Every structure is written in structure tokens, then in C-alpha cells.
Amino acid sequence: MPSQPLLQIRDLSIIDKNNQQPLLNKLCLTIHQHRTLAIVGESGSGKSLLSKAIIGLLPPTLTANGQILFQQQSLLDYSNAQRQQLRGKQINLIVQNAMGAFDPMMTIGAQFMETLACHFNLSYEEQQQRIVSALQKTKLDQVHNLLGSHPHQLSGGQLQRVMIAFALALEPTIIIADEPTTSLDAITQYEIIQQLTQLIKQQNMTLIFITHDLSLVREIADDIAVMKEGDLIEYASKEQLFNAPQHPYTRFLLETRRKLTQRFEKIMSKPYVING
Ligand SMILES: Nc1ncnc2c1ncn2[C@@H]1O[C@H](COP(=O)(O)OP(=O)(O)OP(=O)(O)O)[C@@H](O)[C@H]1O
């Protein structure tokens, strides 16, 4: 039984003001509380633009028409100040390139405290408690050393975990994760996503997860939206989509993945022989 709609997107179009080209076409999507929605689709299909429109970070050369209702409030009618207040605390974005998201001149601890101060009125001790707890939840070691470090002193995996900890510490209603681990190796990627999805469930948050990776989607999603060339072509529960895909493009995506998996399994089942 689906829960309350948290986010309703109605006839959302995004137009390039320079040439009036539509980049997203009258997209309609309802996102329910406490669920994980995966958005999949080929490169350039409009996944990131959709997430930017939700969080209010579209570049000024693009315009959004239609409606984005968050808890019945029309976000496209919000002022910049209202959007800024919502960002981070209510709707939080975790992006792919963690390094670019941090200030290189400030320690992680100082940035964490600054972020919390924007949204909460906490004492120094309360801030520290919240920061350490969020970092530990993402399985980061030596938290105190880490807080004194600058971003360049951390690995890609550590930085991604810190970014997730920032998001969790703000206890947002929705986290949008836009290919958050693409730049990491497969094992670290898998571990981080597992932790992120577990923590999101524990903290009763809603997750929108943007990815190309259908195997990951099968693991973590409740619902799946498939995009192609600015259109939402299919939106269904995971079971429905994997068992009975309706659109030929969705069938093509699933078939391609199945063939790749079969090929991989065939290669792995052969004994390893060194020629020559
Ligand atoms: N600022 C912009 N101005 C004009 N066109 C843009 C802008 N940003 C994105 N686009 C175009 O909009 C389309 C959708 O881009 P978007 O970044 O949302 O794709 P995506 O599905 O997230 O792709 P990827 O998986 O490669 O990240 C693309 O054709 C892209 O070139």
C-alpha cells in the first residue's frame, strides 16, 4: 500500500532559453514517503536536470514550467531565499564529485559546523555530538583526525562518506543522490550504497537515486523511473518493471543487462589459461 505522496511533479518541462529547446517534456511523477525511487536512463536523458529542478539549482539559462509540489507546497513559486532554506535541511543533494563540493581551504570539521549552523541552533557540544555520530554511521574511522583534515587529504571514498554524513546529520526529508559513487571502485561503491540505503531506511527518509547501474537498482529501489531523451517513458514498482516491462526501451535496457551478465558469467566460469 503506497504511503503519502511527498513530492508530486506535474507536467514539468525544462526549456533552454537560448534556443527554446525542450530538455524535459511534461514529466509527471509522484514520489511516496519512505520509498527509494531509482531514476535510470541513458546519458543525456534528463536525470540530472530533473534533480536540479527539484532542488532549485537549475542554471539561469534554463526555465522550468509545470509544478513541483513538495508536501503540497509549490516549489517553483518559492523565492530564492525560501529555496535556500529548503535545500540541505529538507531536500538534500549528494553529488558524484565530492571533492568539488567541499571548500579546499577549510577543514572538514569547520565545514561541517558551518553547515549545521545554517540549519540548527545547537550548542558547540550538540554540534560535535551530531557530527561524530553522523561520521561514525557512515563507518569512517579516526573521526577526530578526519575533522582536522582538509578535503585533499582524504581519499575519494572517504570524501563520499563525509558527504553522506553531512546529508544524514541534517536529517532531511528527501535525499537525492546523483550517481554518488560512480568515481569509486566497485567494492567501495557497493559498500557505500548499502550503508546509505540502510541509514535512509533507519532514519525514515525518502531517497531518489540516479544511476546507470541496473544491478544496483535491483538491490536498492522500491520504484523505478526510466527516462529517455527528456521523457519519462516508464514508472513502476521494481517488481513490476523487472518482471513485466511495458516500454520497448525498458525491455531493451533489461535485455542488454541480461546479456552482459550472461557473458560475464561465461567468462568467469572458464579456467584461466596463460597463452604462450
Ligand atoms: N545548462 C544547460 N544548458 C543547455 N543544455 C543542457 C544544460 N544542462 C544539460 N543540458 C542538456 O540537457 C540534456 C539532459 O542533461 P542531463 O544532465 O540531465 O542528462 P543525464 O540524464 O543526467 O545524463 P548523464 O547520465 O550523462 O549525467 C542533455 O542533452 C544536456 O546536454
Image (cartoon, rainbow, N blue to C red):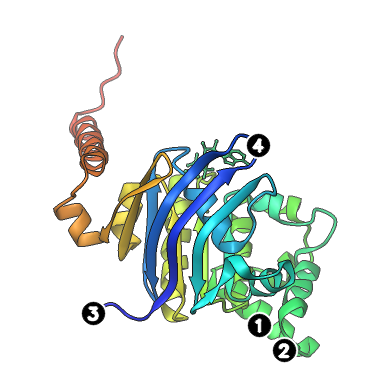
Q: Which residue is mark 3?
A: 1
Q: Give the side of residue 96 with respect to residue 246, left or right.
A: right
Q: Which residue is mark 1?
A: 130
Q: Nearer the viewer, mark 4 or mark 2?
A: 4
Vertically, is 219 above or below 18? below
Q: Are marks 4 and 3 in contact (CB under 8 Å)?
A: no
- How packed mark 1 is, by other alpha carbons closer than 10 Å (few <14, some 14-19, many 20 or more), is many
Mark 4 CB near ligand 1 (8 Å cut):
yes
Instruction: Name the secondary structure under disc 4.
Output: loop
In the rendered structure, the answer to whether residue 120 lies left or right of residue 236 reads right
Q: Is mark 3 within 8 Å of ligand 1?
A: no
Mark 2 vs mark 3, foreground winner is 3
Mark 2 lies on residue: 126
Using the image, tell me which numbered label, if any, was put on residue 258: none
Q: Secondary structure at mark 1?
A: helix
Q: Earlier in the sequence, mark 4 or mark 3?
A: 3
Q: CA distance from mark 4 to mark 3?
A: 44 Å
Q: Quadrant of ligand 1?
A: top right
Q: Amino acid at mark 2?
A: Glu
Secondary element at image label 3: loop
**As drawn, is 271 to the left or to the right of 76?**
left
Q: CA distance from mark 4 to mark 1?
A: 45 Å
Per the image, the residue denoted by label 4 is 18
Q: Which label's residue is closer to the chain start, 2 or 3?
A: 3
Percent x, y of residue 246: 18, 49
How much space separates mark 4 and mark 2, taking CA atoms?
A: 48 Å
Q: Is mark 1 within 8 Å of ligand 1?
A: no
In the picture as drawn, the residue positioned furthest to the left comes out as 244
